[in-house]
Amino acid sequence: MTLEIIPVKDPEAILSRTNGFTERETHIMREAMKASTYMWIVEWNGELVAFWGVIPITLSSSTVYLWFYTLPELKGCALAFARKSREVTTATLGVYDKIIGHCVESALASHRWLRWCGATFGEPFHGAIPFEIKAG
């Protein structure tokens, strides 16, 4: 069983491997991907199980916004993913000073993963919790 986190540049390389997105969701994902400076896919035994990227909050910012999408199959390799993703987080913080984002309040597995990566959380607001991960 192998887990790989693979950098990608082309949104279509990711979107062509997904199904079940509506036309609107595909458009939203494509726009987020085009705005991303870095993107990664997660494969478990060659199967796509997640993908994510970071978007600078302004053109010259040292802060990036994290977006993340998981497929149900990620549950089968969550621990291996958590361990490897920390390396990607550390590398991202070598380029940017801070990673920010929002996490669904009820997504407890996501909270654990973000804490593992060094996140601190703000106060919940309308079902989402803001977080940040800082370098150093």
Image (cartoon, helix red, strand yellow):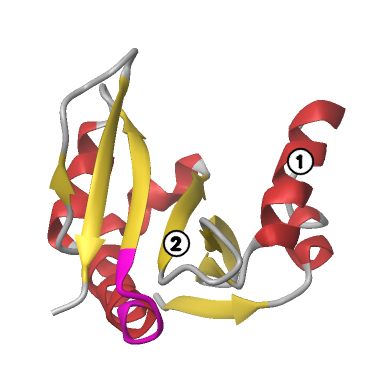
Q: Is residue 25 magenta?
A: no
> Is residue 22 shown to the viewer in this render?
no
Q: Which corner quadrant of the image does residue 8 belong to?
A: bottom right
- Which residue, as the protein is rendered here, is positioned at the far front? 60
Relative depth, front residue between 14 and 90: 90
Relative depth, front residue between 3 and 107: 107
Circle 1 SS class: loop
Amino acid type assigned to the residue bearing label 1 in the image: Asn
Query: Considering only vertical position in the picture, is 92 above or below 77?
Result: below
**Which residue is depicted at the point 69% across and 59% down?**
35
- Location of the C terminus (image quadrant): bottom left
**Residue 52 location in percent, x, y?**
52, 58
The disc placed on residue 11 is none
Amino acid type assigned to the residue bearing label 2 in the image: Val
The disc placed on residue 19 is 1
Residue at the spot of label 2: 64
Q: Which residues are magenta?
A: 93-98
Circle 2 SS class: strand
Is 104 left, or right, of 29 in this rendering? left
Query: Considering only vertical position in the picture, is 55 above or below 101?
Result: below
**Residue 118 location in percent, x, y?**
14, 62
Q: CA distance from mark 1 to mark 2?
A: 27 Å
